[in-house]
Amino acid sequence: MCDLFLKLVVAAVVAGPVAAQERIIVIGDSTMAWNDGGVTRAMATALGEPVRDESVNGARFSHPFSLLVGPMDIRAQLPRLPFDWVVVTGGANDFAAECDCTACGDVLDDLVGQDGQLGQIPDFLEEVTLRGSRVIWAQYYDPPDGSAPFDACTDEFAALDDRLTRVAARMNGVTLVSMGAVVNAADPEDYDSDRVHPAQRASDRIGTYIARIIESLE
């Protein structure tokens, strides 16, 4: 018995400490993935626990005629593992790729119907919440003041937010969080040099902001 106990102790020491189970995951597009997963790192620091990051630059929810595979489809970034929280954003690349941010009615309807009932996003969120996870949907911040690559998408983002508000109102476990609350369109230092993605300090603010909201909901 003593020999067995000693072997178990030695095995535990050799294996090292068991990694903490990640109960929060971040998925989505480059808004999350930028700065080497800066939003996720800031969340982990603020929460004092590991946070998993599966976001990918260029990812989207996809349009029926797209040929997305694997992690380029935001829905496919989420493993079938139990997570307490799923933090997600998306839609910008759908508008840019499928309709060039103009005449995007069909793409918008495919993502979220006008009444918030139908669409790829509501279907996905319903599946996630039925698994027992709670969702933070991170709404996009505004493009910086002046000319910026996604200026043409402003109306699409506003319509997406409006429809997602209807989704969240009827679906338990879904919370909308505006990244614009901590990214200042009037301050160019909040943006990377491409005038699209968050600067490191903006990623830090976004991650900390989301972490505090998770804490408040728990």
Image (cartoon, grey):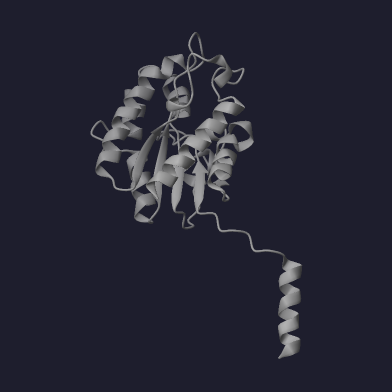
Position of residue 174 in the picture relative to residue 3 (left or right):
left
Q: Nearer the viewer, residue 125 or 37?
A: 37
Q: Is residue 18 above or below residue 75?
A: below
Kindly indicate the quadrant of the structure image that contains residue 100. top left
Whether residue 117 is visible to the viewer of this picture, yes or no, is no
What's the residue at 49%, 15% (across, down)? Answer: 144
Q: Nearer the viewer, residue 110 or 18?
A: 18
Horizontal and vertical percent for residue 211? 48, 41
What's the residue at 74%, 89% (across, down)? Answer: 2
Whether residue 112 is visible to the viewer of this picture, yes or no, is yes
Number of marks in the image?
A: 0
Residue found farthest to the bottom:
1
Q: Quadrant of the N terminus?
A: bottom right
What's the residue at 42%, 21% (across, down)? Answer: 99
Q: Is residue 1 above or below residue 203?
A: below
Position of residue 116 in the picture relative to residue 102 (left or right):
left
Residue found farthest to the top:
146
Horizontal and vertical percent for residue 136? 41, 41
Q: Nearer the viewer, residue 57 or 33?
A: 33
Position of residue 46 in the picture relative to residue 91 (left or right):
right
Kindly indicate the quadrant of the structure image that contains residue 179. top left
What's the residue at 58%, 43% (across, down)? Answer: 45
Position of residue 72 in the picture relative to residue 163 (left or right):
right
Horizontal and vertical percent for residue 177? 40, 34
Horizontal and vertical percent for residue 94? 44, 29
